[in-house]
Image (cartoon, rainbow, N blue to C red):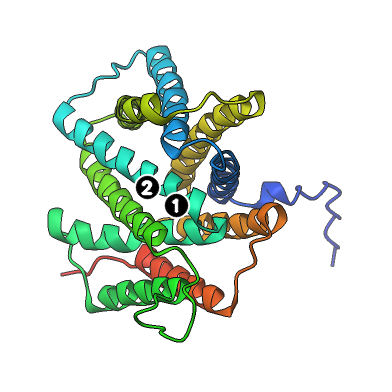
Amino acid sequence: MPHPEPDDRPAAPFAARIPAGVRYMAAAAFFFSVMSLLVKATGRRLPPQEMVLARAVVGAALSWYWLRARGVSPWGNRRGLLLVRGVVGFGALSAFFFALTRLPLADATVIQYTNPVFTAALAAVFLGEAIRGRDVGLILLSLAGVVLMTRPGFLFGGLEERLDPLAVAVALAGAVLSAGAYVTVRKLSRTEDPVVIVFWFALVATAGSIPFTAANGLMPTRWEWLALLAIGVLTQLGQVALTRGLKEERAGRAMAVAYMQIVFAAVWGALFFAEIPDAWGLTGALLIVAGTAGIARSRPPTG
């Protein structure tokens, strides 16, 4: 019996064996985590709205260039809904940047990642998408995780509150607004180019943050100018990688890889800000991840 010829071809590199969608989602998680790190570091002196303005200006410029290069009109078809998406997105971004300056990096990131929970609830109300009892249980599980991370005094009377209640409330509001933005994007995606939606978001955020920056802004130092530019560029890179990852990979696995951002945030927080979570915080974070991952993987009921 003849023996098969040995395969002398070199084995593919490890990275090449990872699906393209997973690589894109991992890259997006890394880009977004470094952006958050720079926001927290720069936010020690600069007000959050100044960082929102920098991020929005860079995003608007890059989106405009991209659309013009492709010959696509930036103004879209459903301008009223595009404006709504921009306003809601501006509120979400403002809340997230505020939370990053007041909360530990990993905690602000985890709370932001509750947005799939609120997306499921809002989609049920505004898009008529069915929501099952299992999904309601997962929503409650995630909210229980937020309570454990925060430890509000009126529930944990003998324990000191771990996180600033105002910052947590703003972070949760940002997650709800992010969910509203995602629901709006789902409606817009039927008629609009994705980059047009991104452009309107950046345009509205630019206009919305200018008055606040004019009233309270500070002149950035040379290092802060570089950080502000990097915040805008990293966010744009993250959005591009995220879009490609969601196109290439199943939503459930894509969301699982996206949670790498929480791991990155925990590493940056420990390395640069000496932020070490306690057992309560870790337990709460695990509950949030379990709940939102379950929501992300959940399939709509049939029939």
Quadrant in the rendering for residue 264:
bottom right
Of residue 93 and residue 71, the one placed in the foreground of this image is 93
Instruction: Give the CA distance from mark 1 to mark 2.
Output: 6 Å
Residue 285 locus on image (x, y percent): 50, 70
Mark 1, secondary structure of its residue: helix
Mark number displayed over residue 95:
2
Of residue 216 and residue 134, the one placed in the foreground of this image is 216
Residue 70 locus on image (x, y percent): 39, 16
Residue 99 locus on image (x, y percent): 44, 52
Amino acid at circle 1: Ala
181, above or below 59, in the image: below
Dot 1 alpha-carbon crowd within 10 angstroms: few under 14, some 14 to 19, many 20 or more: many
Q: Quadrant of the N terminus?
A: bottom right
Q: Are marks 1 and 2 in contact (CB under 8 Å)?
A: yes
Please give the name of the residue rendered at 39% of the width and 75% of the height, measured from the top-left corner.
152
Of residue 76 and residue 180, the one placed in the foreground of this image is 180
Q: Is residue 114 left or right of residue 129?
A: right
Mark number displayed over residue 208:
none
Amino acid at circle 2: Ala
Q: Farthest residue in the bottom direction?
A: 158
Q: Is residue 188 left or right of residue 170?
A: left
Quadrant in the rendering for residue 295:
bottom left
Mark 2, secondary structure of its residue: helix
Return the residue at label 1: 99
Please give the name of the residue rendered at 38% of the width and 18% of the height, measured from the top-left corner.
67
Please give the name of the residue rendered at 41% of the width and 30% of the height, measured from the top-left corner.
216
